[in-house]
Image (cartoon, grey):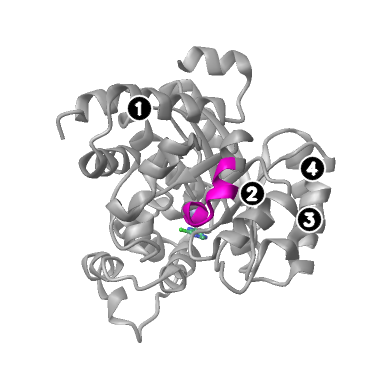
Amino acid sequence: THLHDFLKRLPKCEHHIHLEGALTPPVLFHLAKRNSISLPSDDNAFSSPESLLERYGRFTSLDDFLHYYYIGMSVLIHASDFEALAWDYFRHASADGVHHAEVFFDPQAHTSRGVSYTTALSGFQAACHRAERELGITTELITCFLRHLPVPDCLATFEDKAVQESYVSCAVRGIGLDSSELDFPPHLFKELYAKAQKQGLRVTSHAGEEGPVEYISSALSDLQVDRIDHGIRLADDEELMRKVAAGKTLLTVCPMSNVVLKAARSIKDIPIRKFLDAGVQFSINSDDPAYFGGYILDNYCAIQEHFDLSIQEWKRIARAGIDGSWCSERRKKQIL
Ligand code: ES4
Ligand code: ZN
C-alpha cells in the first residue's frame, strides 16, 4: 500500500502477542528433533513444516487453532528454547518499527507438562533484556491464565511461589486471560482478578473475540480490567461503545487473527470505522504471528488496504497505543 513506509516508520507499541504464538513451523520441527519430542503421527499436518503451514491456512475456529497451538509449544523444553522464540519475535517486531512490546505467555501450558515456570520465565526475560540492549525496544511480560482450565488451577498458579516472586520483582507486570472463550465467561475469574489488582498488577482479558459483547461488559465490571484484548464485538452495543470510549479503555485489536480464526468474515468486517467514529481507543496487533500469516506491520497494512485511513487517523491510533501502554510516563514521551 502507498502508506507502507509511513506505517513502518510510525512508532508502534504492540500489546497483544502470545510469545508461544511466535513459534514458526521450521523452528517447531527443529526443536522437536533436538528435544526428542514426538509430534502426532496420526495427523498428516505434522508430516512436514510445509504441510503444517498449509493446515494453519485452514483454521475453522479459535478452538481449532488452539489444538495446534498447544501441541506446537510442547517442543519448548529448555530456557534457551524460550529465549530463542522470544528473540525471534523481537527481531521481527524491531524490523516492523515496534518501540515498546507488552508480551503474553501461558505459564500453565508449560507447568502442566513438567516445564517449570522459572525455565520459561528466565528464557523470556533473557530475550527481553537483549531486546532492550540491542534493539532499543522496551518490554513488559504478562502472564495469561488459561480459562478452559478449572478456576482453582488458575488460582493455584497465581499463588505459586515462583509466580508471586516474579510479580513482586516486577519481572512480570500484569495478568491476562486467554484460550477458549465461549464456555468460560469472565465472571468465573473475579477472585483471581481481585487478588491481582490488590497486589498492584495491571490486568487485561481476552473478551469479545468469539464471545458476545456481554463478555466485554463482564470483563469491565466483574474483572475491572484496564484493557480488553480483541473486543471486536463491542460494536454490537452502541451504549457500551460510548462508555468504553469515555473511559479510554484500550482495545487490542488483531485483524489477521480475526479473519484466520473466523471471528470476522474479512478485514472490512472489523469495526475499525465505528471505533474511530465513536472515539474508542485501540491498538493493532499480531496475536500469534507464526500462525496467522503476519507480524504487526502486516496487520497495519491490512487495515490500511481496507479502510484507507488518513495520516491523521494513523497518528491517533499510534497515540492511543502509547497512552494505553503500561510503561512509565517518561518512556511514553520518548516513544512519541
Ligand atoms: C489466542 Cl487468538 C487467541 N485467543 C485466545 N487465546 C489465545 N491464546 C493464544 N492465542
Ligand atoms: Zn490473543
Point out the residue furthest to the bottom here.
42
Q: Secondary structure at mark 1?
A: helix
Quadrant in which the C terminus appears? top left
- The magenta segment is 233-242
Residue bearing the label numbered 2: 143
The reply to whether the C-beta atoms of the residues labelled 4 and 2 are less than 8 Å apart is no
Mark 3 / mark 2, whichever is N-terminal: 2
Real-space Cα separation, disc 1 to disc 2, in angstroms: 32 Å
Q: Which mark is residue 197?
A: 4
Question: In the depicted view, which residue is nearer to us: 270 or 196?
Answer: 270
Between disc 4 and disc 2, whose residue precedes? Answer: 2
N-term-proximal mark, 1 vs 2: 2
Task: Indicate the quadrant where residue 11 lies.
Answer: top left
Decide which of 324, 114 is in the foreground and name it. 324
Name the residue that disc number 1 marks: 313
Q: What kind of residue is marked 1? A: Glu
Q: Disc 1 versus disc 3: distance between alpha carbons? A: 37 Å
Distance between the alpha carbons at the discs numbered 4 and 1: 33 Å
Majority secondary structure of magenta residues: helix
Which secondary structure lies at badge 3?
helix
- Residue name at image x 57 percent, y 56 percent: 207
Pointer 1 local density, CA inside 10 Å: few below 14, some 14–19, many at least 20: few
In the rendered structure, the answer to whether residue 116 lies left or right of residue 275 reads right
Q: Position of residue 52 (x, y in %)?
A: 28, 69
Check if mark 3's residue and mark 4's residue have beta carbons within 8 Å.
Answer: no
Residue 125 image offset from top left, x and y in percent: 58, 37
Depth check, mark 4 against mark 1: the one in front is: 1
**Tag 2: residue type?**
Thr
Q: Nearer the viewer, mark 1 or mark 3?
A: 1
